[in-house]
Amino acid sequence: MDSVTYVQNVTSGPNSALALRGLTKRFDDKVAVAGVDLDVPVGSFYGLLGPNGAGKTTSLSMAVGLLRPDAGNAYVLGHDVWSDPVEAKRRLGALPDSARMFDRLSGSELLAYTGLLRGLPADVVDSRATELLDVLGLADAGRTLVVDYSAGMKKKIGLACAMLHAPRLLVLDEPFEAVDPVSGALIRDILIRYVRNGGTVIFSSHVMAVVEKLCTHIAILADGQIKIVGTTEEVRGGRELEDVFVDVVGGRVATGAELSWL
Ligand SMILES: Nc1ncnc2c1ncn2[C@@H]1O[C@H](COP(=O)(O)OP(=O)(O)OP(=O)(O)O)[C@@H](O)[C@H]1O
């Protein structure tokens, strides 16, 4: 796949769209995130990779104010997510993992609820919700309860909720998981246009081809720590991203002796 080009300047440092500093989280004896530092430059399309259990969801949940860190800070365009949540969340749209949604509402109701909670005027919510449902192919399901949506439809309504207030940063946990190829391409196009218009995206994924194609920057997380970070070219170093990933996280090769009973 050809890589996508974006036009705007990319700025980082104190002006990062998202800055994580020493984020740490422990669940009982398990250290899920062990001091993550990350700068997501304004205008970047940032891919967060890592094997199952690496700490991606935990890191992103802390970054958007859904999970309180044991230590460390998260800043959205300079606003601390935990001490200045109103300003931080005004600039932020989040697609959390799985079903942290009010799923006993219909798609239209969920968007209306989300928009009004965000302080948008009712007529703006109404017209944006209609447009989002239409663009994402959910117009026919606008009156269906979200609990009855398929997994891919839940992703799409979650994405619509994240984008409704036109945030400057999108933090998306596995936005391409469970969506069909047509919907995946649609979501990619929407996000590419969003970044070209000056937005910033960070998303977690297991799909190397998508990350390789879309992302300006990549971080690979394993055992709760960032193992490698940089621009896509720097991280790849002229190799296939999948090979770099396997090297970085320590791949496991079947010997043929396993599951001999099967
Ligand atoms: N609420 C929780 N209670 C206990 N342990 C948890 C909890 N949430 C996450 N963990 C543990 O923290 C570690 C990191 O989990 P996390 O969900 O952040 O990984 P991930 O990189 O998102 O994985 P995946 O790619 O499978 O979604 C795992 O060992 C997981 O079992």
Image: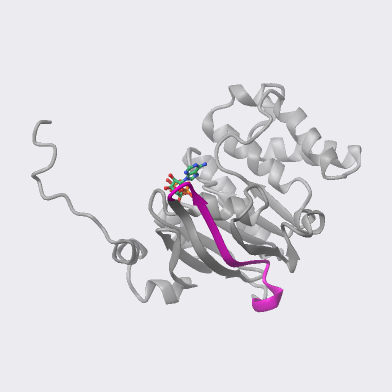
Which picture quadrant has residue 101?
A: top right
Q: Is residue 99 above or below residue 251?
A: above
- The residue furthest front is 29
Q: Is residue 62 above or below residue 74?
A: above
What is the x, y in percent for residue 96? Answer: 60, 44
Residue drawn 75% across and 35% down? 111
Left or right, 151 with reference to 139? left
Residue nearest the viewer, comparing 178 with 184: 178
Q: Is residue 27 above or below residue 114?
A: below
Quarter of the picture containing the C terminus is top left
Left or right, 129 with reference to 12? right
Give the residues drawn in magenta, as a range: 11-29
Which picture quadrant has residue 160?
A: top right
Residue drawn 62% across and 48% down? 67
Residue drawn 72% across and 40% down? 132
Left or right, 244 with reference to 89? left
The answer to whether residue 42 of the structure is visible from this angle is yes
What is the x, y in percent for residue 189? Answer: 59, 52
Which picture quadrant has residue 250?
A: bottom left
The answer to whether residue 2 of the structure is visible from this angle is no
Residue nearest the viewer, comparing 64 with 30: 30
Residue 116 belongs to the span the image colors magenta? no
What is the x, y in percent for residue 109? Answer: 77, 28
Left or right, 41 with reference to 35? right
Quarter of the picture containing the N terminus is bottom left
Residue 19 belongs to the span the image colors magenta? yes
What is the x, y in percent for residue 84? Answer: 79, 59
Q: How many marks?
A: 0
How is the protein colored in the picture? one colour
Q: Is residue 117 above or below residue 91?
A: above
